[in-house]
Image (cartoon, rainbow, N blue to C red):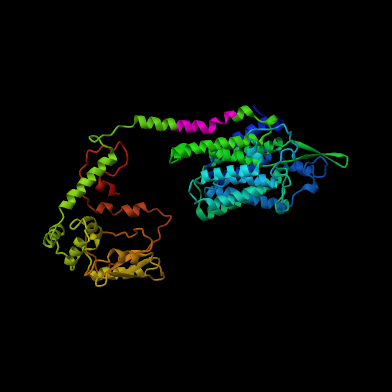
Amino acid sequence: MVSPRDFRNDPQTSIALALLLAVVTSYLFRREDELLSEIICWACLPMMFGANTFREQVRADLPTRRETRHTLPSPLSLWAVAGCLSIASGWRAEADSSKLLPVLTPLLLWTDGGLDRNAQGRDSTDTSKLGPLYSRLWKASLVAVLLTFLLIDWNYSGLVPSGVATGASFIAYVSFQSRPRGSHFFPYLNPFEEHVYSLAPRVAGVLLVGSLARVSIFGLPRSSPLYALFLGPVKALSWRCAATAVRNHFPSIHIWASNFQVKARHTSWTLPTVMTTFGLLATRDPSEFTFESQAFLNAASALLCLGQIAGLIPRQIRPTRFLYSCITLPMIPYVANIMAIYHARTDAATFTADAPHPVMALYNKAQKEFENQSTRQSTTFEAASHNYQHRYGIEPPPGFKEWYDAARSNGSPLIDDFDSLYHTISPFWRLSGSQVLDAMLQAKSLPGSDLWLCTLSGTSSTTTCSHSYRNFDRHVSRMFNNILANFTGLPDVTFLVNHIDEPRVISQPSPEAPSPYDRRITVEDRSRKPIWDLLAKNCGLQEREVEGQDNINTFSLSFVTNISSAQDL
């Protein structure tokens, strides 16, 4: 068992634990538990550092106190850093905010002035083949660009929250470093472990206020308190090990000035950011990628991050064996995914013309049914009129001859089979035309209806739409004008169109014909409310013709093989 004193005094142990906990934290990350686990983390962090507020107050006037009065940061600096850390945590809880995480590495290198190793007092013999990936700013920037493009993966939806979270993290990490370039623009809380007991309560408080505000607006999240209770101390231990690794990573520097030997310590938080990037890449599931090349690039990029970590650490304190063992973290899932794909391909059934794939079998079945349906269509107006009367039991509506001529001239594949449309409007057959028109006018005038009242002119084949308060109809009239440009002689038609192209009209069928005064049209906002019972309560009143089952083997896949059963809620 490793005690706190062990990894305080053993640089290799502290660096190894910091890297291991960065991977574990990335693997255990769950967005719904982020805020609660962060609150627990910052509540536990002073205890992880052995900070005791009462003891610090007792020692306030003693010269042995590490954080002396002249080094105490201003409350504004503490609240600023606490706000940045809270912003980063908040965006991690709300969106994918890790796409720009690799950018932190060259930014922190830049604030460190490039980190010339000899200038920082390192041994000039401490060389590494991977060192230039760290010491040269332009090479580190090139690696960051490559990793950023890999994480973005042509999906730019999360760049704004990622940019905000990355900027907030940058300000926080710069404040923990030794006096950086342009440091007067940033807070200064160096070293981190000596300010944690002043910073942690502020971060936890800001996160708690933000969580309560979020709950009051959006309700309780689907988080697991037990999971967050476990993840919080893990995150706190990760911060503890990262701070120790940063302190051990840069040994003390002896500077001679005015015949006095001054012992200074340079600290940089570049190493923890690269460790976090490695943990993010190493814990990504290869099976979630679309292409095999993406999984390979992710594994290769994780190894590149691991090389950067090795280049960041001086050779004399580098945990070489542990870093070699970390190669397996991204490679084992990648190889396992390759083997799973191989076994899935070899174990898959072989499909032939006699035993086709279920998709091809369903396609062939649908194609044959459509061809049979096309051959049954009427080729003359008299046949179409007769089929309409036979199918629906009523005379064709006025203008049917003009519609038939327009459909034939435009090459419509269907002339007779419009059963879906007929059954959709069948609940309104018992209403007269004037009742339907009055109902549309009433629905349009109701508050919250958000409906367009459109009128098709049969003589000019143009459609005009009007709204109670909107001016832009989302190209509804333009769509009908384009579709019906060659259809002349049609009757004038008035109809309603939802502004949002989603069906939201629920009819309540009744066996009795409604009276002219029974026009119960209501508009109700059902957002964030249960909707299933309202949708399905009328399904039992409608009789559906059950189609015969086919003999297509779908191998337990959820293909739609029966339209009637698929539409039955």
**How many numbered marks are there?**
0
Looking at the image, which is closer to me, 308 or 228? Answer: 308
Provide residue 144's location: percent of width, then percent of height: 58, 44
Looking at the image, which is closer to me, 518 or 302? Answer: 302
Residue 207 showing in the rendered view: no
Which is the main secondary structure of the residues drawn in magenta?
helix
Q: Residue placed at 58% from the left, 40% from the top?
A: 277
Vertical relation: 338 (above or below) 58:
above
Residue found at the very far right of the displayed protein: 259
Looking at the image, which is closer to me, 467 or 221? Answer: 467
In this rendering, would 133 be left or right of 542?
Answer: right
Looking at the image, which is closer to me, 556 or 289? Answer: 289
Provide residue 264's location: percent of width, then percent of height: 78, 40
| Residue range of the region highlighted in magenta in the rendering | 324-337
Vertical relation: 420 (above or below) 71:
below
Q: Quadrant of the N terminus?
A: top right
Q: Indicate yes or no whether the magenta region holds residue 115.
A: no
Residue 391 showing in the rendered view: yes
Provide residue 443's location: percent of width, then percent of height: 34, 67
In this rendering, would 513 be left or right of 472?
Answer: left
Q: Indicate yes or no whether the magenta region holds residue 330.
A: yes
In this rendering, would 382 be left or right of 25?
Answer: left
Provide residue 432's location: percent of width, then percent of height: 22, 68
Splitting the image into 4 quarters, where does residue 523 fall?
bottom left
